[in-house]
Amino acid sequence: MAAEGSAKNAEGRLEEIESKLALAEDLLESLNLTVYRQQQQIERLERALLSVREQVEAGALAQDPAAPKHELPPHY
């Protein structure tokens, strides 16, 4: 009888461990997907930032360097 109870206890513990392992695997997969998506978003944002930086630099170069930037109009 004691061996039978011990076997059931061991089987129950094994099922609990298997259940926890399955949950951990699901969580790991979910976290990996989240990290992957975040990396994609970071790369998109980096490309957008580079594009904006290039546009700003191109706009700064296109301005006439001889034109005063913040000069008051003559009637002031």
Image (tube, rainbow, N blue to C red):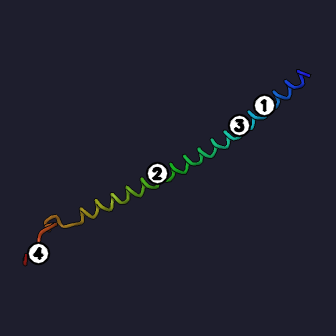
Q: Residue furthest left?
A: 75
- Residue beneath label 1, please? 14
First-in-chain label (4 vs 1): 1
Image point 51% across, 51% down: which residue?
40
How far from the left and from the top, in percent, is residue 3? 89, 21
Toward the bottom, the furthest residue is 75
- What is the CA distance from the residue labelled 1 to the residue labelled 2? 42 Å
| Crowdedness near tag 1: few (<14), some (14–19) or many (≥20) residues, C-alpha within 10 Å | few
The N terminus, quarter of image: top right
Ranked by sequence position, the earlier of labels 4 and 3 is 3
Which one is nearer the viewer's eye here, 16 or 71?
16
User: Which residue is the site of mark 4?
Assistant: 73
Element under disc 4: loop
Of mark 2 and mark 4, the one earlier in the sequence is 2
Identify the residue at the far top of this view: 2
Q: Is residue 44 toward the left or the right of residue 27 in the image?
A: left
Whether tag 4 and tag 1 are in contact, CB under 8 A, the answer is no
Q: Are marks 1 and 2 in contact (CB under 8 Å)?
A: no
Tell me whether circle 4 and circle 3 mark residues in contact (CB < 8 Å). Answer: no
Report the residue at 21% width, 66% height from top: 63
Residue at mark 3 = 20
Asked if residue 24 is positioned above or below residue 51 in the image, the reply reads above
CA gap, disc 4 and disc 1:
84 Å
Q: State the residue at coordinates (16%, 64%).
A: 65
- Label 1 is placed on what type of residue? Leu
Mark 1 residue element: helix
Which-is-in-front pick, marks 1 and 2? 1
**Tag 2, which secondary structure?**
helix
